[in-house]
Amino acid sequence: MSYGAAPALQTAVFQRLSAWPALAGVAIHDAVPPAVSGTFVLVGPEEARDQSDKTGAGAEHQLVISVITDAAGFLSIKTVAAEISDALVGAPLALSRGALVSLFFLRASARRIEEGETRRIDLTFRARVQL
């Protein structure tokens, strides 16, 4: 197993989301920005597991993409989350290391945080990478 493709996968996901027309104007970060308001996307945590087989090395990455907003209601944040899903599911991402075999949506969790003033949706995707 190798975690070697993780930076390449994160870079490709970030580039795909940054170029997605429906997400224009939505800030995309890989760390929570200080004192931010409005809506933003956070390319966040990830778990990787060995998926090597007799044909070669590989890994399964479960990555979490979060949408966070201080806007009232869930409709606007769900719209952004749906666009993220549309942008990533089955996307032909080119990696600088390794090759993306598949990219699927696994689950989503929507909730209020910070005493209900902030809303967050965590989208979990499964990426299979061949090294």
Image (cartoon, rainbow, N blue to C red):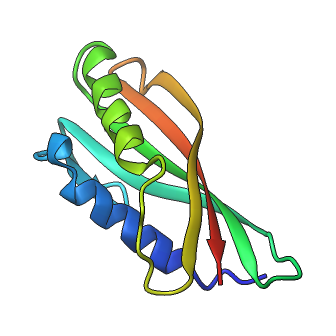
Residue 51 x/y as whole percent: 80, 70
Query: Toward which corner of the image does residue 10 lie, by quadrant?
Result: bottom left
**Residue 123 in picture, x, y percent from top left:** 50, 39
Q: Residue placed at 42% from the left, 63% from the top?
A: 92
Taking depth in this image into account, of 36 and 84 the one nearest to the observer is 84
Q: Is residue 34 visible?
A: no
Residue drawn where x is 71% and y is 71% of the image: 59
**Residue at the extreme left:** 25
Q: In the visual, does 107 lie left or right of 21?
A: right
- Quarter occupied by the N terminus: bottom right
Question: How many numbered marks does the figure carry?
Answer: 0
Quarter of the image where the C terminus is located: bottom right
Residue extending furthest toward the front: 55
The percent position of residue 7, horizontal first and vertical second, equals 49, 78
**Residue occupying the far right of the picture:** 54
Residue 128, by quadrant, is bottom right
Query: Can I make out residue 82 in this image?
Result: yes
Q: Is residue 33 above or below residue 70?
A: below
Q: Position of residue 70 (x, y in %)?
A: 25, 27
Rendering quarter of residue 39? top left
Residue shown at the point (34%, 36%) measured from the top left = 68
Left or right: residue 55 versus residue 46 is right
Q: Is residue 40 above or below residue 116?
A: below
Viewer-proximal residue among 56 and 120: 56
Above/below status of 52 relative to 113 = below
